[in-house]
Amino acid sequence: MFRRLSFIVYLALAFLALSGVVYFVHYLIFRDVHHIFIYMIGDLAFLPLEVLLVVLIIERVLARRAQQAKLQKLNMVVGAFFTEVGNHLLNALFPYFDNKAEIAEQLNINEDWTKKDFRRAAAYAYNLNVEFDCAKIDLEALKTFLAGKRTFILTMLENPNLLEHDRFTDLLWAVTHLDEELEARQSVTGLCGNDAEHIAGDIQRMYDHLASEWLDYVEHLKANYPFLFSLILRTHPFQENPSPVID
């Protein structure tokens, strides 16, 4: 740190000396001190405006563009997650929920949804409470599926761009934890009361994060990729008869 600071000081002194030499050469050629000071004061007067333009305006514009590019890459990562893992979990677990009619009423997106509709649905999804009997869920199939996606999810957690998206990282950890809980049990059929209740809590936590992130992702697709949004509209589980086929 001290070396870096010394280098900056020496560099600043070198530039000041260079500027002095140039002004001195200008004086030797034209012998006009008045002209030199007129332009020097004019340059100094413009300096605050230049700082304003470069630091406060141009830099912020560039930073915003960089942030948008980073979010674009992040949305690609989120899209890969839902393609490989998220959409399957949404579809596989939803039929087991006792309050699926209420959830479907709130999350049944359509092509006419506005930002206001997404905000309303997001407020519901952020505090989603799913009601289900853990004994009715095919936990063995869920365990097998998550085990097959373990490497994919762990690879996603290594992505440095996810540091900008805490909620999506929480979703990945919730999925990873559920996978670990199921994998730690030799058998997930016929779980006892307390154990089943614990697994149910893990599923609840994961589905809560899953539905919230899914809504954000779908809203992004609606604004930027209508052809992908069209497929989501036809296949999401919160409608009566999901089907990719266009009638």
Image: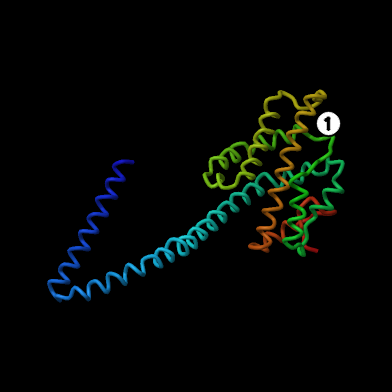
- Residue located beneath label 1 in the image: 135
Residue 176, image x, y percentages: 64, 35
> Where 135 falls versus 232 (above or below)?
above
Which quadrant is home to the C terminus? bottom right
Q: Which residue is drawn at 87% across and 41% down?
A: 98
Residue 209, image x, y percentages: 70, 43
For mark 1, give the secondary structure: helix
Residue lying at the far front of the rendered structure: 34
Judge by depth and name the residue closer to the eye, 119 or 193.
119
All told, the count of numbered labels is: 1
Which quadrant is home to the N terminus? top left
Q: Residue at x 59, y 41 (%)?
A: 152
Q: Residue at x 71, y 24 (%)?
A: 185
**How many residues crowd around disc 1 within 10 Å: few (fewer than 14), some, or many (20 or more)?**
some
> Where 31 falls versus 75 (above or below)?
below
Q: Which amino acid does label 1 sit on?
A: Ala
Is 42 on the left or on the right of 204, as rendered? left
Is 34 on the left or on the right of 55, as rendered? left
> Where 8 falls versus 174 (above or below)?
below
Residue 131, image x, y percentages: 84, 39
Judge by depth and name the residue closer to the eye, 209 or 40.
40
Residue 108, image x, y percentages: 80, 55
What colouring does the structure picture have? rainbow
Kindly indicate the quadrant of the structure image that contains residue 183.
top right
Q: Residue at x 75, y 50 (%)?
A: 123
Is 91 on the left or on the right of 17, as rendered? right
Judge by depth and name the residue closer to the eye, 155 or 129.
129
